[in-house]
Amino acid sequence: MDFLYTLFVFLHIVGAAALVGGWLATFRKPTVLQWQHIGAWVQLVTGLLLVGLAEMGDGTVNHMKIGIKLVILIGVLVAAVIGRRKVARDEPVAKGLAHAVGGLSLINIAIAVFW
């Protein structure tokens, strides 16, 4: 079970790296990359699995923190999906939308680290 938990933590961090890394890579000309879209989904799935594993184990779960992080992640996911759809239609992605994906992801990482 420890290996599974560690694997999900690893994949969760990779998802965060895809979100923030893609944001920083396109900071001057904001857009939403494919890897950011994938990273948002990876964050959602692995986050839910991590909470499920924590609930099954004897660890305590801070439900307030998880709820806040989930709401922020849903915002990231919605922005990433809308941005990818605009890219697929060759429409310009609004700067605010592209920066929302990376900025909200960075806020989510800060909550995970400092709370």
Image: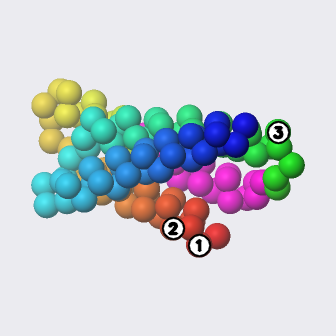
Q: Is residue 105 above or below residue 10?
A: below
Residue located 53% across and 53% down the image:
72
| Residues at marks 1 and 2 touching, judged by CB atoms closer than 8 Å | yes
Q: Of the residues tagged 3 and 2, which is closer to the observer?
A: 3
Left or right? Give the position of 37 relative to 25: right
Give the amino acid at mark 1: Phe
Horizontal side of 114 relative to 63 (left or right) equals left
Tell me the distance, in whole angstroms, between the alpha carbons under discs 3 and 1: 24 Å
**Mark 3 burial class by Cα count in 10 Å: few <14, some 14-19, many 20+:** few
Q: CA distance from mark 3 to mark 2?
A: 26 Å
Helix, strand or loop at label 2? It is helix
Is 93 in the magenta?
A: no
Residue under the image location 50 percent in, 61 percent down: 109
Q: Position of residue 98 (x, y in %)?
A: 28, 51
Magenta span covers which residues?
61-78
50 displayed left or right of 85 = right
Which image quadrant for residue 26?
A: bottom left
Q: Disc 3 or 2, which lies upstream in sequence?
A: 3
Quadrant, the C terminus:
bottom right
The secondary structure that most of the magenta stretch takes on is helix
The front one of 38 and 95 is 38
Residue 58 screen position, x and y as percent: 86, 49
Residue designated by label 3? 56
Residue named by callout 2: 110
Residue 52, percent across and down? Answer: 73, 38
Name the residue carrying label 1: 114
